[in-house]
Image (spheres, rainbow, N blue to C red):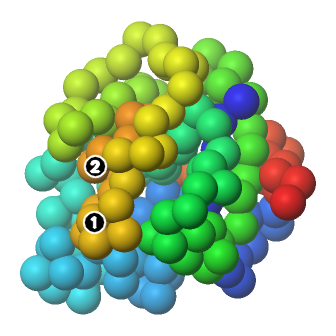
């Protein structure tokens, strides 16, 4: 199973899990600082410099975020709903075009997903972008979203 955390409120169970290219401005504000602009076209252009297809990609983890003592992780979780979907979706070429592995700040295309345990202890409360320290995956989506029929809300 794969897990994605999406800001509350959201419409994931109605309209699917959307990549940045399909997000509204509120949801794109997360990328505005890195892009140096709040304009959608400039945010999308910036994302495409990360790797080809990044603007159509969603981030996912191979396990739920730990119930650790980290205020950073707990704060992140409290602002988001957790959604789960089967990793089998990667075999559906109508939905997933490619998969990228992100680890220690580097990006590389992945043929398989590593489901070994994640090391949550690496996260410190003063980390700016803690996902740089946690192995995760970016699924490049052919249409920019995972349809809602493939997604469930993870139980609390």
- Alpha carbons under labels 2 and 1: distance apart: 9 Å
Q: Secondary structure at mark 1?
A: loop
Where 84 falls versus 77 (above or below)? above
Where 47 falls versus 14 (above or below)? above
Label 2 environment density (alpha carbons within 10 Å; few <14, some 14–19, many ≥20)? some
- Say left or right for 95 vs 58: right
Q: Secondary structure at mark 2?
A: helix
Residue 27 image position (x, y, % from top left): 48, 79
In this view, the mark in front (2 or 1): 1
Which residue bears the numbered disc 2?
132
Q: On the rendered image, what quadrant is the N terminus found in?
A: top right
The residue positioned 39% from the left and 35% from the top of the image is 135
Residue 35 image position (x, y, % from top left): 15, 73
Instruction: Judge by depth and name the residue closer to the eye, 94 or 58.
Output: 58
Which residue bears the numbered disc 1?
127
Instruction: Judge by depth and name the residue closer to the eye, 143 or 49.
Output: 49
Where 146 falls versus 29 (above or below)? above
The residue positioned 74% from the left and 73% from the top of the image is 11
Label 1 environment density (alpha carbons within 10 Å; few <14, some 14–19, many ≥20)? few
- The answer to whether one can see residue 54 in this image is no
Instruction: Judge by depth and name the residue closer to the eye, 138 or 143.
Output: 138
The residue positioned 36% from the left and 69% from the top of the image is 125
Q: Quadrant of residue 91?
A: top right
Residue 63 image position (x, y, % from top left): 63, 37
Do the CB atoms of the residues marked 2 and 1 lie less than 8 Å apart? yes
């Amino acid at each position: 199973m794969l897990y994605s955390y999406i800001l509350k409120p959201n419409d994931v169970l109605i309209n699917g899990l959307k990549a940045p290219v399909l997000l509204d401005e509120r949801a794109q504000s997360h990328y505005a600082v890195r892009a140096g602009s709040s304009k959608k076209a400039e945010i999308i252009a910036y994302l495409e410099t990360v790797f080809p297809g990044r603007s159509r990609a969603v981030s996912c983890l191979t396990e739920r975020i730990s119930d650790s003592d980290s205020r950073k992780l707990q704060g992140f979780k409290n602002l988001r709903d957790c959604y789960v979907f089967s990793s089998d979706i990667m075999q559906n070429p109508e939905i997933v075009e490619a998969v990228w592995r992100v680890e220690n700040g580097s990006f590389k295309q992945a043929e398989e997903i590593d489901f070994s345990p994640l090391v949550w202890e690496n996260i410190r409360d003063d980390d700016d972008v803690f996902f740089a320290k946690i192995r995760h995956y970016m699924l490049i989506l052919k249409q920019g979203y995972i349809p809602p029929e493939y997604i469930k809300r993870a139980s609390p």
